[in-house]
Each structure stands twice: as structure tokens, then as C-alpha cells.
Amino acid sequence: MVKRKWDMLGIWFLFPFSRFSLPSLGVVPRLCDRVNGPWYLRPLCWDYMTEWALFIGSPFWSPTGYHRPRRRFLFPRTKRVHCHGHSPEARHQLQDLRRDPGPISGTRPDPEPNPDPPLSPPKLGFILPLSALLFLPFFYLVFFHYEIDGELRRSIAINAAMSIGGFVLAVRLIPVAARYLLRRNMFGYDINKKGTPQGAIKVPESLGIVIGIVYLLIAILFQHFNFTADSNWLVEYNAALASICFMILLGFVDDVLDIPWRVKLVLPSFAALPLLMAYAGHTTIIIPKPLIQYTGVAILDLGWIYKLYMGMLAVFCTNAINIHAGINGLEVGQTVVISAAILIHNVMQIGASSDPEYKQAHAFSIYLVMPLLTTSLGLLSYNWYPSTVFVGDTYTYFAGMAMAVVGILGHFSETLLLFFLPQVLNFLYSCPQLFKIIPCPRHRLPRFDPQTGLLTGTKDGTLVNLFLRLFGRCSEKALCIRLLIFQALACLACFGLRYMLAGWYK
């Protein structure tokens, strides 16, 4: 072999060209071979460099990403042979085999085909129009309808850009995490498709962990663009992130260990402790005008009772999202609808107020809820019917805690409960079973008919079964759409109620 002074020169100057370019034609010696070249040049060989180029650029052309072949990076795997106890002839043959292991295809068998089919591509044809429908009213109010301070608009624009990046990152990471979860046997079967070919497919669970990590990444990096070291809001902002992070951890523990219900009810109270300990806002409430004549005061300071109320609100929101579930897209869909309503409510309050502190509280809420909305849309692209991933308790706890934190620090907990009207009704309807007054099965799901593909309501106390009993049998997708329309109507009714009671109620 000719000693290679052109190795480095040929690699780095010709890398922009294809691997079938000059080196493969013999113009430049292709001497840094994957197997036989020097070990310090093997990472720079054409095969590896083209593979890494495909991997890095795959987000721009492939919905599922480039899957690099499973190979040893620096040292190819060879047969392990031992000379002890063999004849001299056999020992020489084995030593020759060590020196020349042969082509890599002959020394390592091809990997067994993966029995689990890859994830279906994200349903971007449905998600992108939905995203435009949800964000257009918000951006119209921020940049055209209301006269909002330029610095605040800049912060909202930066938060929106980072949130869109979070959507892209979530869409890219979900298939990767799904493969790891399947390897660790964290999967389930869709009960609402039992008896059909789709009911026999392994569906990876607990994909809410991806959304939680991406959300925290965006929220932490956003501090660099909006808060200074002496900002009064920085402590509460980080306390809010600590509570959300704690809830993500407890939700994932629940997915792995399957914690009983009586313990699940207590978990959010522990996760809310960082926020409650760092909360330095007011603990007063405004008495409704019709009740002032009975209380004698217009503003009442509740003290520690207000913090107790905040902890109970966190417990309710996390569990309310968790129990209003059971069909593809419902958990994420209700979060998307409520988050969009919270965004519009916050910008309306900013535009209608002249109090700087009041504006900052609602801007604080926008900074936390916009990444929740975009990352949830990324998850919905895989969780919408027919779902290819399950969100798990990790996501429901995370989403409920995030919205509870937003309502607490934005000082609109009453409005938040109105946005949660379907969840409140579902909780009240479920109380006899949740508190063991009547028998409660493990899965309070409707009954699926594999012949017709329709769901039939059971006697279990959930809003899902109630809708089926009231409006008749339907498909899983149609049922989810009906429930999300009801959620949207509840949010619209909240806006209408606030408008009618403005100036009279408070």
C-alpha cells in the first residue's frame, strides 16, 4: 500500500461532494478505509462522514429521521478466537484469522429485523391548520388589536419563536423515545380497538416525558432573553419550573410503578410545594360587588388559607386531566383547547389594563403556557386517532400542573376553573366511583364493537360514557371531536360570562 499523505487533504477538501465523487473514481487515494485504515483516521472515512451528514440533515427531508446502521464506530467487531489448547497448525490458522478478519459483512451477521413496525408519520396535515386556527386570534390581538408595549411584544415574539422550535424538536424526538420505550417493554395495547389488527399493535407509553423535557428546556432558556438577575419574577418563575419538573418526575414514576389512586391524589400537593414556598404575591381576593353589603369589605386577605387553596387547585387540575381520558387524542386535545383559551384571556387582560404589575402577571402566564401549547400540538400529531403513542400519566400530570401554575401566578384561578368546566363535571360525576361508594373498575372505558367499529357507553361515571349514552353510539374519533367541541364551547361560555358580569360582579 502507498503511504498516504493525501488522506486528510482528500477528506476535508472533498467532503462537500458525494461519496461517489473523486475518491471513489481513484483521483484521490481513498486510503482511510473503515476497517484497514489507521485507527485515528477511521472516524474521518467517507462512509462515516456521509452517514453523519445524512443523520444531521435528516430533519429537513424525512418525517421519521435517518436511521444510522448499527456498527462499531472505531473498531469493527471481529470474531473472538482463543488459541489455548489447540494444535500448532490450528493456532497458526487462528492467528491468521485475527490478523485478517475479512470483510465486515462476513464477520458480523446482519441484525435481526425489528418485529415492531415503525411509528406512522406525524399527522401534520391536521395539526398545522389547527395550529393556525389557534394562534391567529392570539397574534392578531397582540400585534394589531391592542396597544401593547414594544418590549413586551418583543418578549412574546421571542417566546413564540422558541415555542415553535419546541414543536419541531418534539416531533423529531418522539419517534426516538418511542423506540427506547419499546425496547424497555413500556408499551400497551389500545383497548378501544380490541379484536381488530390495530388492537394487537404495541403502542409505546409515557411519551409525555419527551414533551416535559422539551417544555422545561424552552422555559429555562427563555430566562436569558427576558429576566435579569435582579428581576422580582425570577424566583417565582424558577419555583414554577421546579414544581412542573417535580410533577413530571412523579408522573413518570407513576407510569413505571403504577401507583394506587389514593397516593395519586397526594402527589400533586408535594409537587406544588416549591411554588407555595416561593410565592410572594398577594393573598387577597376581591369580594363580588353583590356580596360587599354582607361582608362589609371589598378586599379580603385570606393569608395561609389562600396558599392552601392554591395547593388544592394544583391537586384538582392534575387529577382532572388524568381522569378525563381514555380515547385517542382526548388528554392532549383538552390541554390544547384550554391552553389556547388561556393565551387569549391573558392578552385580553394585558390590553385592557393599565397596571404594570397586572400586565406582567399575565405576560408571565403567556411565557409559561405558549410552550405548553406548541409542544402539546407536537404530541397530538402522534396521539390523534389512530394513536401511535400513548401519553401516560407523565403528560396528564405535567399538563395539569403547568396550567395550575399559570392560573396561580397569573391571578385568574376563578377563570381557570371556568375553563375546566368539563373536567369539573367529569370529576363530580365520577365521585361515587372514585370514593368507592359504588364499584370502580380499573378502566372505565366504553365498550368497543369490533364488527362495526363503534363505541357503546357503559354505566361507569365518566363524561365519555355519558356522551355515548346521551348521543348514541359513534366511532372513537367522532367521540373525541364531540368532547373537544364541548371543551371549546365551555371556554367560549367563560369569555361570554366574564363579559356580561364585567363591572357588576367585580
Image (tube, helix red, strand yellow):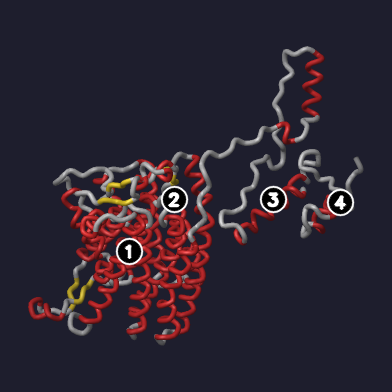
Dot 3: within a 10 Å radius of its alpha carbon, few (fewer than 14), some, or many (20 or more) residues? some
Numbered badge on residue 25? 4
Q: Which residue is mark 2?
A: 389
Callout 1 secondary element? helix
Mark before the other along the chain sequence, 2 or 4: 4
Q: Which residue is mark 3?
A: 51
Residue 308 position, x and y percent, is 22, 61
Question: What distance separates the C-alpha of mark 2 from that of mark 4?
Answer: 46 Å
Question: What distance separates the C-alpha of mark 1 from that of mark 4?
Answer: 60 Å
Residue 185 position, x and y percent, is 45, 39
Mark before the other along the chain sequence, 3 or 4: 4
Image point 47% across, 81% down: which residue?
Answer: 151
Residue 450 position, x and y percent, is 34, 45
Mark before the other along the chain sequence, 2 or 1: 2
Image point 77% across, 30% down: which residue?
Answer: 101
Q: Name the residue type under label 4.
A: Leu
Q: Quadrant of residue 86?
A: top right
Outermost residue on the bottom side: it is 147
Question: What distance separates the C-alpha of mark 2 from that of mark 1?
Answer: 19 Å
The label nearer to you, 1 versus 3, is 1
Q: Name the residue type under label 2.
A: Val
Numbered badge on residue 484? 1
Callout 4 secondary element? helix
Question: What distance separates the C-alpha of mark 2 from that of mark 3?
Answer: 28 Å
